[in-house]
Image: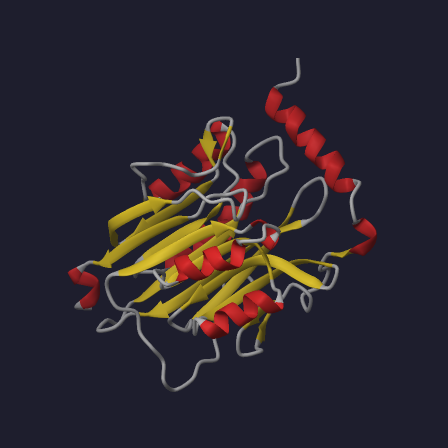
């Protein structure tokens, strides 16, 4: 008997393969596997190699406490995504989005809220570029990205890593935003997708946040992510009233952290996406601030 998760994966694959391929464009060269920044800069750096970002002379620095919003935004298909994002952004210093469409509305949102953004190009559909998007009140110092193709359909899942200056410290915050590979029958592709970020983590001495939609809908996939990060010294932000989207009883979205303390963690019910967002407030440890 075929297991239920495998049946679901096969059905999803058939659906995706049958829709819209004539209008979709998937990057197939380094020039197209591009990270776009708010200042119209383009980067082709692959993690774990960080590339220095172009920044202005009035560089803001991160202070403690600060808040992260993590959300799979469902390609902005639901009508009230913008109002919801604006409301939550007022409480957030960093926003990690998955399934983000780099639309004029999203760009205008970043302008209105005075946020820097990075967008890693996964694919283009009907002239819109989709992928992961990281927004921040503090401009990044360095960045890199990754694109891992879905093994059967070759639609890339992307990730971003970026560093940010910390006020009163020589250390930097490393923020990783990942959309986990999904259409696989084993956890091996997810393990390979995590690999460059685990290498980057080993190189970084400051605090780290690893957030995203990891697509952890089986015990094996969840264990792969959790054990890899626990071995690297991470803890997971937990929610007393956990409203995260689950598949087969397992949450897909996670926020892991190292070198930080959690002050508050919330997951919020919404109809603005098929995923419910998470808001986590962190504080820097005195040892980080004094370095």
From the viewer's perspective, tell me whether residue 206 is left or right of residue 6.
left
Q: Going 23% across and 71% down the picture, which residue do you hit?
A: 169
Mark count: 0
Residue 50 seen in the current view? no
Residue 108 seen in the current view? yes
From the viewer's perspective, tell me whether residue 229 is left or right of residue 81.
left
Based on the displayed image, in which of its 4 quarters is residue 267 positioned? top left
Work out whether 216 lies above or below 179: above
Based on the displayed image, in which of its 4 quarters is residue 254 positioned? top left
Q: Going 23% across and 64% down the picture, which residue do you hit?
A: 64
Residue 260, position in %: x, y? 26, 54
Residue 14, position in %: x, y? 75, 35
Residue 261, position in %: x, y? 23, 51
Q: Classify the position of the C terminus by image quarter.
A: bottom left
Q: Classify the position of the N terminus by image quarter.
A: top right
Q: Going 58% across and 40% down the picture, which residue do you hit?
A: 189
Work out whether 216 lies above or below 126: above
Report the residue that reaches farthest toward the right.
22
Closest to the observer, 64 or 219: 64
Report the residue that reaches farthest toward the bottom.
57
Q: Going 70% across and 30% down the picture, which residue do you hit?
A: 10
Q: How is the image coloured?
A: secondary structure
Closest to the observer, 177 or 142: 177
From the viewer's perspective, tell me whether residue 169 is left or right of residue 127.
left
Closest to the observer, 148 or 65: 65
Residue 13, position in %: x, y? 71, 36
From the viewer's perspective, tell me whether residue 69 is left or right of residue 44.
left
């Amino acid at each position: 008997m075929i297991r239920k998760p495998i049946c679901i994966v096969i059905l999803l694959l058939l659906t995706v393969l049958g829709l819209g391929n004539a209008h979709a464009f998937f990057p197939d060269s380094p020039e197209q596997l591009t990270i776009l920044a708010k200042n119209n800069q383009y980067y082709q750096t692959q993690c774990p190699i960080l590339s220095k970002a172009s920044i202005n002379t009035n560089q803001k620095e991160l202070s403690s406490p600060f808040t992260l919003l993590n959300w799979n935004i469902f390609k902005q298909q639901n009508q009230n995504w913008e109002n919801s994002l604006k409301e939550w952004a007022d409480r957030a210093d960093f926003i990690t989005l998955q399934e983000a469409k780099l639309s004029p509305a999203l760009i205008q949102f970043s302008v209105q809220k005075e946020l820097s953004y990075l967008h890693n190009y996964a694919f283009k559909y009907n002239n819109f570029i989709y992928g992961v998007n990281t927004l921040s009140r503090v401009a990044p110092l360095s960045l890199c990205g990754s694109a891992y193709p879905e093994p059967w359909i070759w639609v890339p899942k992307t990730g971003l890593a970026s560093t940010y200056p910390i006020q009163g410290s020589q250390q930097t915050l490393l923020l990783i935003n990942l959309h986990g590979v999904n259409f696989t029958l084993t956890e091996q592709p997810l393990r390979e997708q995590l690999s460059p970020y685990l290498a980057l983590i080993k190189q970084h001495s400051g605090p780290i946040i690893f957030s995203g939609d990891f697509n952890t809908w089986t015990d094996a996939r969840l264990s792969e992510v959790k054990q890899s990060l626990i071995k690297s010294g991470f803890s997971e932000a937990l929610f007393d009233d956990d409203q995260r989207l689950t598949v087969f009883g397992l949450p897909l979205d996670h926020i892991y952290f190292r070198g930080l303390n959690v002050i508050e963690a919330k997951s919020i019910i919404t109809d603005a996406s098929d995923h419910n967002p998470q808001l986590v407030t962190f504080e820097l440890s005195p040892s980080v601030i004094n370095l």
